[in-house]
Amino acid sequence: MDDMLPAQLARMGYAEPISLLERAAIDRYRASFDESLAASGGKPEPHDLSGYHLKHRWAYELATTPALLDRISSVLGPDLVLWASHFWYKPPFSEDRVPWHCDAVYWPVLNRDIHLTAWIALSASDRGNGCLRMIPGSHRTVPHDTQLQDPTALSLPIADLEMAPGQVTFFSGYLFHGSEGNMSASPRIGYALRFSTPAVRFDEVQVKSGFNYLRSILVRGTDRYHHNDFMAAPPPF
């Protein structure tokens, strides 16, 4: 898979889901998430779902699972920085949808090319509960700042990325993706992690003015650049 991952990302902008966690591990992480959700009254604000890896030991452990970092390294190299995380939680019978977009245009970085998102399913993710939807190849074929409304009107393909609990996918910051609402009786839970390398420069003004919840944590290798010491943080646990 490590050999296939760069090729899939180059061709499609994302990778087909693969198994990352055994059932016992995914059950443990799911229980921890459910406990944190209950503590918020079951209806967390979206910003409260960001940065779990900075607040919860189990979330940092999941974000730095060696098997996950091995696959990230196969794309980005031996020196890895984790700079953001977010839980994408769709409660049962939620009409909330995520419009088509590519992530990188919203990031406060000066080099958007050297990034990779890992998206781990903590629940089943399927068409019924609002799974990720990808536009294969759009990282190369669609201008990144496009306000994309209806891909079918442009004859663009759409792939529904159904995932089992414990599977992970990876995708480019330039890939257009979105999701529909959750019309099922079960929640849909995904853990998105943003990785880059120490060579990437973050925009200090933007980070401090609107993204001060971001932290740059070296999770593997060496930082020979120190571009982002203003947002650097040691492992939180």
Image (tube, rainbow, N blue to C red):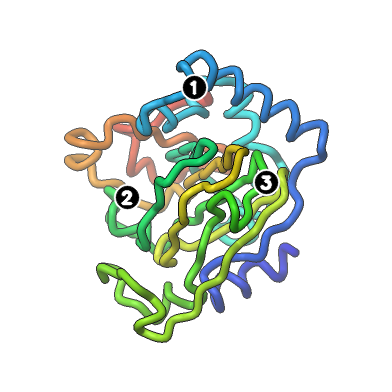
| Residue 17, position as x, y percentages in the image | 68, 59
Which residue, as the protein is rendered here, is positioned at the far top? 39
Is residue 89 rendered to the left or right of residue 96? right
Measure how far apart labels 2 and 1 are at the Cα level.
Answer: 37 Å
Which is more N-terminal, label 1 or label 2?
1
Which residue is denoted by mark 3 in the rendering? 124
| Quarter of the rendering containing residue 229 | top left
Label 1 sits on what residue type? Gly
Question: In this rendering, which labeled residue sits more in front, label 3 or label 2?
Answer: 3
Three-letter code for the amino acid on which mark 3 is drawn: Ala
Which residue is drawn at the image coordinates 27% and 31% (left, top)? 212
**In the rendered image, which quarter is residue 57 located in?**
top right
- Numbered label tally: 3
Contact? badges 3 and 2 (CB < 8 Å) = no
Residue at figure coordinates x 72%, y 63% from the top left: 2
Q: Is residue 53 above or below residue 206?
A: above
Q: CA distance from mark 3 to mark 2?
A: 36 Å
Give the labeled residue for mark 1.
42
Q: CA distance from mark 1 to mark 3?
A: 19 Å
Q: State the residue in front, 190 or 92.
A: 92
Would you say 164 lies left or right of 54 here? right
Q: Secondary structure at mark 3?
A: loop
Q: Nearer the viewer, residue 187 or 89?
A: 187
Q: Residue at x 36, y 58 (%)?
A: 99
